[in-house]
Amino acid sequence: QVPVVESGGGLVQTGGFLRLSCAPSGRTWSIYAMSWFRQAPGKEREFVAAISWSGATIDYADSVKGRFTITRDTSNNTIYLQMTKLKPEDTAVYYCAETAAQSMGRPLSDFRRYGQWGQGTQVIVSS
C-alpha cells in the first residue's frame, strides 16, 4: 500500500511563508477528503484545514483562516497547504490525512474520520 507522504516543512521566521505538500495513498479513486492536522509539543493534535476530493468543500480552523490556503492539484493529485504570515504558535508537526468516509456522522475536522496518515513534517517558526 502506498502511504500518505508529506513534505515541505522547515524553519522560517515570524511573518514568513511555507508550502507543504501531501501525496495521497495510491487508492485515489476512494478518497473523499484530505486534511491537514498539526501537533505541537505537549499539546493535542488539532485540525488545520480540509478539502474534499472534488474541491467543493473546504474548511479551516479559525486560527489559520486568512493565512493558510489548502488546494488540490488535479494534474498530480497533490494536496498543498500554503502557509503565510506564520506565527511562533504555528510551530508543530504537520500531518496530512486521508479519508474515504463520506460522513460517519463526523465533520471533516474530526481526526477520527481519517484512516490514512502521513509521518508528518516539522514546521518551526522562530520569533
Image: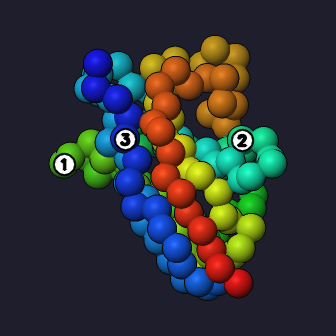
Q: Using residue 122 as the reference point, say whether residue 5 is left or right of it.
A: left
Disc 1 from disc 2: Cα separation: 30 Å
Q: Residue furthest left?
A: 75
Q: Are marks 1 and 3 in contact (CB under 8 Å)?
A: no
At horizontal 56% and vertical 63% (from top left) the residue drawn is 123
User: Which quarter shows the C terminus?
Assistant: bottom right
Q: Can residue 9 be seen at all in this image of the molecule?
A: yes
At horizontal 66% and vertical 64% (from top left) the residue drawn is 91
Which residue does the numbered mark 3 point to in the structure image? 5
Q: Secondary structure at mark 2?
A: loop
Disc 2 from disc 3: Cα separation: 18 Å
Which residue does the numbered mark 1 point to in the structure image? 75
The first of marks 1 and 3 along the sequence is 3
Expressed as whole percent of the image width and height from the top left, the position of residue 63 reads: 74, 61
The three-letter code of the residue at mark 3 reads: Val
Which residue does the numbered mark 2 point to in the structure image? 45
Q: Can residue 60 be seen at all in this image of the molecule?
A: no
- Give me the disc on residue 37: none
The three-letter code of the residue at mark 2 reads: Arg
The first of marks 1 and 2 along the sequence is 2
The first of marks 2 and 3 along the sequence is 3
The three-letter code of the residue at mark 1 reads: Ser
At horizontal 61% and vertical 23% (from top left) the residue drawn is 113
Expressed as whole percent of the image width and height from the top left, the position of residue 74 reads: 25, 46
Is 112 located above or below residue 79 in the figure? above
Disc 1 from disc 3: Cα separation: 17 Å
Expressed as whole percent of the image width and height from the top left, the position of residue 58 reads: 54, 47
Q: Are marks 1 and 2 in contact (CB under 8 Å)?
A: no
